[in-house]
Image: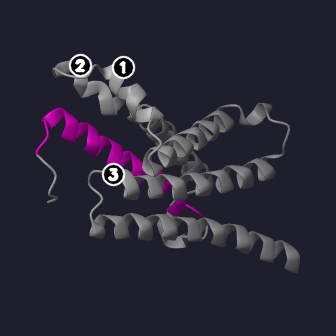
């Protein structure tokens, strides 16, 4: 529905996979205890299980996202994929810089999740750090998508902003409720 030129099925498919992965990542915020209606039928162990499965799959997709941008170049004449990738990551456009920051934060989230039991912190501390890092990642990733995304029309930008903001608010509400309950006890 945008005014961009038509692209190949491969390029559009990769875009759709990336967009869906981004929305699934933001959707993780809605699976908090503060969103009682979404998690009413689930036990906490099931929520954690689904969170891990979705998180690892989505992180893998989003970590290879920069490479998916240049993959179609293998099947086209013109700029080689490696040259296109180097051009992308060395361009100091705000959207690219935001994407590199978001990608780095997501990598940190993934590594932090994989080595959680080896980190010198209690689970509750790890969970708060993980949540805060995820919020910063989501905000910067959403800004990257809005600033640089091919499909970021005004309506899509508002939708991304509302979903990301709502998800962040749910997570903040979860942390604020916990602090309030512990301070009253």
Apparent side of residue 159 relative to residue 7 in the rendered image (left or right): right
Residue drawn 13% across the image and 36% down it: 8
In this view, 10 is above or below 2: above
Estimate the x, y position of residue 3 in percent, counting from the top left: 14, 57
> In the rendered view, how is the structure colored?
one colour
> Where does residue 40 sit, x and y in percent of width and height?
52, 67
Q: Is residue 157 above or below residue 116?
A: below
Vertical order, 132 against 162 (above or below): above
Query: Which mark identifies residue 74?
Result: 2
For the point 45% across and 33% down, which residue is it? Answer: 89
- Report the Cα–Cα distance between label 3 and label 1: 21 Å
Quadrant holding the N terminus: bottom left
Crowdedness of circle 3 by 10 Å Cα count: few (<14), some, many (20+)?
Answer: some
Q: Is residue 149 left or right of residue 40?
A: left
Q: Nearer the viewer, residue 169 or 149?
A: 149
Q: Secondary structure at mark 2?
A: helix
Circle 1 sits on which residue? 82
126 in magenta: no
* Magenta region: 6-32
Q: Which residue is mark 3?
A: 149
Q: Residues within 10 Å of mark 1 (few under 14, many from 20)?
A: some
Name which of mark 1 and mark 2 comes first in the sequence.
Answer: 2
Q: Secondary structure at mark 3?
A: loop
Residue at 48% across, 52% down: 141
Inspect this view and state whether residue 60 appears. Answer: no
Is residue 9 inside the magenta stretch?
A: yes
Q: Nearer the viewer, mark 3 or mark 1?
A: 1
Q: Main secondary structure of the magenta part?
A: helix
């Amino acid at each position: 529905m945008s005014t961009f030129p038509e692209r190949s099925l491969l390029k559009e498919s990769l875009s759709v996979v990336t967009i869906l992965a981004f929305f699934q990542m933001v959707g993780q915020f809605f699976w908090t205890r503060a969103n009682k209606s979404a998690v009413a039928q689930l036990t906490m162990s099931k929520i954690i299980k689904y969170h891990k499965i979705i998180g690892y799959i989505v992180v893998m997709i989003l970590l290879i996202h920069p490479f998916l941008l240049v993959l179609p170049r293998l099947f086209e004449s013109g700029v080689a994929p490696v040259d296109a990738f180097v051009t992308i990551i060395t361009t100091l456009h705000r959207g690219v810089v935001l994407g590199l920051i978001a990608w780095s934060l997501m990598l940190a989230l993934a590594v932090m999740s994989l080595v959680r039991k080896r980190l010198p912190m209690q689970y509750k501390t790890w969970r708060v750090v993980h949540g805060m890092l995820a919020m910063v990642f989501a905000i910067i990733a959403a800004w990257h998508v809005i600033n640089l995304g091919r499909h970021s029309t005004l309506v899509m930008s508002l939708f991304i902003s509302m979903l990301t903001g709502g998800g962040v608010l749910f997570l903040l509400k979860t942390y604020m409720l916990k602090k309030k309950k512990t301070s009253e006890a």
